[in-house]
Amino acid sequence: MEDKRSGGSARGTVDVGDGDRAANGAASVTFAEDATAAVAELRVNRSGGVREGVLEVRGDSGAAVATQDGPVGADGAPDPSAGARAGSRRAAAPATKHQSAPPMMNALNKSASGKKVVEKESREGLEFAKGGHFSAWYQQLVVKSELIEFYDISGCYIFRPWSYAIWERIREFFDAEIKLLGVDNAYFPLFVSARRLESEREHVEGFAAEVAWVTRSGSSELEEPIAVRPTSETIIYPAMAKWIRSHRDLPLKLNQWSNVVRWEFKHPTPFIRSREFLWQEGHTAHVSREDADEEVLVILELYRRIYEELLAVPVIKGVKSDKERFAGGLYTTTIEAFVPANGRAIQAATSHSLGQNFAKMFDIWYEAGDGRSRAMPWQNSWGCTTRTIGVAVMVHGDDKGLVLPPRVAPVQVVVVPIVLRGKNEAVHPMCLMIADRLRRYGMRVKYDDRTERTPGWKFNHWELRGVPLRLEVGPRDIAAEQVLVTRRDTGEKTALPLQADMVDAVHDPLADAVHALLERVQADMLARATAERNAHIGRAADWEAFMRLLEAGHMILTPWCNAGECEEQVKQRSGECATAIAQEEAAGGGGLTGAAKTLCLPFAAEMQRLQLCAVDEYEAPADGKRCFACERPARRWALWGRSY
């Protein structure tokens, strides 16, 4: 067996067992090196011939899932005697590692032509439970739902049309909003010289470990290494210095949609932590600090709206601690999301005040209004990435697949015909009519008219991909003048009246009802996610209570001294107390650790919105309170947790 992991290959052995038991038994794998995530070619010697397929290896423990494409003869040709028996089979990993889902398709169903067919067992559905092995569930889900395809360079992924369409929804919303603020789009080069990148020590030190360098051109060494941008401050600000001459040139507001590269040392996780990702980065310059500070919060509110109004993911707004703020910046504001299934917070987006630090670094000046003096502008930068997609998948997905919020779903409604022999003449025209009416109302609709697939297969296929609503139309529905609508998020089924004579009317009752149901799904998803998130926020006044909540997978609000050395001690102590968790998750959870960190210092409005404390309590946290970790007088409220 040859391991074809990205970044190289490794030889190994596989032991599947004897006879038919091997198809359903345990497979053990031994690699010459760590097998954290691998896809290997598999050939299994069995009585009756050789089977070929693909072996997916997850975790260095050797947990494996094998796909067998069927028996072949000694010469490698398919065995004609196998017939329909050559369906995919699974060699399951030990039950302690994951739970296998039932086959995706029913064994007996009807095709679109009305004929009874016996369908093969399929591995198109998920084989891991979200609550059993979260990391394996997520890795499998993003591939099987056709969000991404893995690439042969670790940490780089192919965005398939399904995920890119979600990113386009986010991009369209945000781009329209920032243009209302006077922001113009531009594009700057991908590369930055070493001299320019290293011109500000504090800034580059924040990214030094993640910078990818180009050092050769063909067979020749470059005189000066060229960095692939990890962020664009050092690329954009020299241009700003040329363009800003007078106070009349301000404010200057630029944004670019681009890719960046950060060569993470941690185990990459699709969308969440990757070596190349898509994002928008805004860079602005202002006459006054007041104007700059106002924009920081305006942009942060737009990011909140992306998550809560589009993705139905609740977030908490706050400011980062000095230790966690953007390198070289004055302060960093953030929105923090949370994944209850694994007790992890995720930094969702950030809006930075850079003060005048970068203006000093890049010599950006403008002539003041009096015509005699010069001044430096106040600058901001802000960014949001394709991490948005991963957060939504983690929060809403279930054991059947994706659960997409209607406002970002590439397809909001799928229409599935239900066929009965001899009674199908009216079904196809009715499905076309319904799909057309919904599209005219601005809905994104797919009519699945594939004749080679059964309704049951289609149900599972679109559930895996997270389409919010499924409309079923069959002869009985047409006779009863109704359609059956199924919600992806809850599975709830509703019969909606179907009035064919309303096809040319200005107002279509069916379209109105479907649109209202989509809005209800969107609101319900946010409400459920918010309630679950809130149930995972606790308060702690001392270390023991803090650790109990941390081990229970909570975010913890504490009174805190706001000292950097205390923050570092909390990280070290909590990591030592969670060594077992750290070892387990580092092996199979994407390089996660058990240590806690500050997520943010929540804004007063957020504390009150979440009913975490009263106004006077927030404004005077030191009044009779001490730091939960070091017992010095408390200065701030801090939200802590484990984080990606």
Image (cartoon, rainbow, N blue to C red):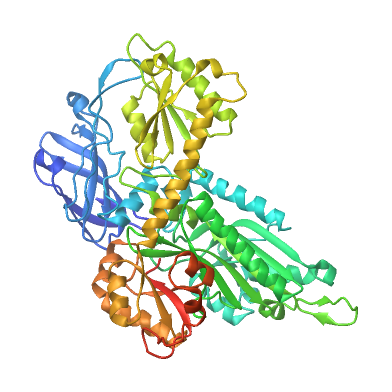
Q: Position of residue 450 (x, y in %)?
A: 41, 23
* 223 left or right, relative to 547: right
Image quarter (top left, top right, bottom left or bottom right) of the C terminus: bottom left
Farthest bottom residue in view? 632
- Which residue is at 47% across, 37% downward? 517
Comparing 435 with 152, the one in front is 435
Say which quarter of the image contains residue 35. Answer: bottom left
Q: State the residue at coordinates (37%, 48%).
A: 397
- Please report the residue visible at 40 percent of the width from the left and 40 percent of the height from the top: 465
Q: Which residue is rendered at x = 65% and y = 62% of the image? A: 282
In the rendered view, would you say 99 is above or below 594? above
- Nearest the viewer among 546 and 427 is 546
Residue 639 x, y percent position in the rendering: 43, 73
Q: Is residue 213 visible?
A: yes
Q: Residue furthest top?
A: 422
Q: From the viewer's perspective, is residue 452 above or below residue 171? A: above
Q: Is residue 211 visible?
A: no
Give above or below for 487 relative to 338.
above
In the shown orientation, is residue 57 left or right of residue 529?
Answer: left
Count of labels in the image: 0
- Give residue 373's position: percent from left, percent from top: 86, 82
- Measured from the top left, where is residue 46 in percent x and y? 13, 39
The answer to which of 264 and 5 lies nearer the viewer is: 264
User: Which quadrant holds residue 352?
Assistant: bottom right
Q: Is residue 31 left or right of residue 274?
A: left
